[in-house]
Image (cartoon, helix red, strand yellow):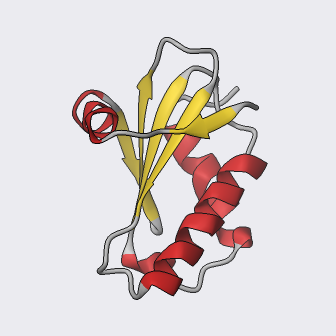
C-alpha cells in the first residue's frame, strides 16, 4: 500500500468538510476520495493530549499502525484526529481500532 503525507491546511479542511468520519476510542478517522492512486495520511494531535514528546509518540504510533494495516482501499485522503485516550496506547490497540473504523466507513479491501 502506497501512502504519502497529506499536507496543507486546505486539504485537511476538505477532508473534514467533505469526507466521511467514524469515531473510535482512541481517534476519529476522516476519509475523502481523491483523484490519485495512492492514499494520503494526515494526523492531528492537539496540545490537550500532552507535551511534545507525548504528541510525537502518538503520531508515530498512528503512522506505524496505518502502515501495518492493509485494510484500506486505495485513492483516499485520510485524516486521523487523536483523542486524549491515545496516551500510552501501543500498536496492539491501534491496529484493531483502524480495522474497525475502516469497516465502518466501507473502506476495506
Residue 58 x, y percent position in the rendering: 54, 72
Residue 46 versus residue 33 in the image, above or below: below
Of the 4 image quadrants, the one containing the N terminus is top right
Q: Residue at x 72, y 48 (%)?
A: 67
Residue with the most extreme front position: 8
- On the question of residue 103 being in view, the answer is no
| For residue 60, side relative to residue 69 (left or right) | left
Residue with the most extreme top position: 35
Q: Residue at x 41, y 88 (%)?
A: 51
Q: Nearer the viewer, residue 95 or 35?
A: 35
Residue 38 versus residue 81 in the image, above or below: above
> For residue 28, what is the image quadrant?
bottom left
Of the 4 image quadrants, the one containing the C terminus is top right
Q: Residue at x 33, y 30 (%)?
A: 19
Residue 62 x, y percent position in the rendering: 59, 61
Q: Residue at x 38, y 78 (%)?
A: 84
Q: How many marks?
A: 0
- On the question of residue 44 being in view, the answer is yes
> For residue 15, what is the image quadrant?
top left
Residue 10 x, y percent position in the rendering: 26, 34
Q: Nearer the viewer, residue 96 or 16?
A: 16
| For residue 107, side relative to residue 8 (left or right) | right
| For residue 101, side relative to residue 49 (left or right) | right
Residue 4 x, y percent position in the rendering: 61, 36
Amino acid at each position: 500500500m502506497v501512502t504519502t503525507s497529506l499536507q496543507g491546511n486546505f486539504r485537511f479542511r476538505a477532508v473534514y468538510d467533505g469526507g466521511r468520519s467514524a469515531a473510535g476510542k482512541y481517534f476519529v478517522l476522516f476519509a475523502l476520495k481523491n483523484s490519485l492512486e495512492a492514499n494520503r495520511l494526515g494526523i492531528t494531535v492537539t496540545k490537550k493530549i500532552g507535551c511534545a514528546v507525548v504528541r510525537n509518540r502518538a503520531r508515530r504510533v498512528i503512522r506505524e499502525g496505518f502502515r501495518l494495516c492493509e485494510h484500506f482501499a486505495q485513492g483516499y485522503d485520510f485524516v486521523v484526529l487523536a483523542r486524549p485516550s491515545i496516551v500510552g496506547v501501543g500498536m496492539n490497540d491501534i491496529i484493531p481500532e483502524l480495522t474497525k473504523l475502516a469497516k465502518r466507513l466501507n473502506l476495506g479491501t
